[in-house]
Image: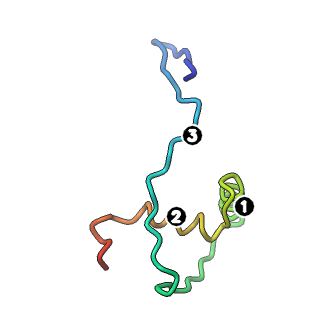
Amino acid sequence: MAIYSLLFGHTDWPDDRPVRRPLHVPPLDDTARVTLRLPAGLKRRVEASARLEGITAETWVTGALARSVDPRLEAL
């Protein structure tokens, strides 16, 4: 844990990236195709983020969407 000095004190900052909550991935036979237009800069950042995690951009986007939806809607 790193300690950073601030104007009115200090704060601890974790050295590691936060662990993402587990991802519920639906079975492959229950998929749908989506076409999504993104700004070029955002697309590059998504691809770079996926590379950092060692996964495809498609898997990264699926995970980001799955973490973002309200869990109460899981049954839909």
Observer-nearest residue: 27 or 38? Answer: 27
Q: Residues within 10 Å of mark 3 (few under 14, many from 20)?
A: few
Q: In the image, is 42 to the left or to the right of 27?
A: right
Numbered tag placed on residue 14 in the rendering: none
Q: Earlier in the sequence, mark 2 or mark 1?
A: 1
Identify the residue at image location x=55%, y=14%: 5
Snapshot colouring: rainbow
Q: Amino acid at mark 1?
A: Arg
Residue for badge 1: 44
Q: Amino acid at mark 2?
A: Gly
Q: Are marks 2 and 1 in contact (CB under 8 Å)?
A: no
Residue 31 horizontal/vertical position (percent): 50, 84
Observer-nearest residue: 52 or 6? Answer: 52
Closer mark to the observer between disc 2 and disc 1: 2
Residue for badge 3: 17
Q: Residues within 10 Å of mark 1 (few under 14, many from 20)?
A: few
Instruction: From this view, report whether residue 19 is shown above or below residue 66.
Output: above
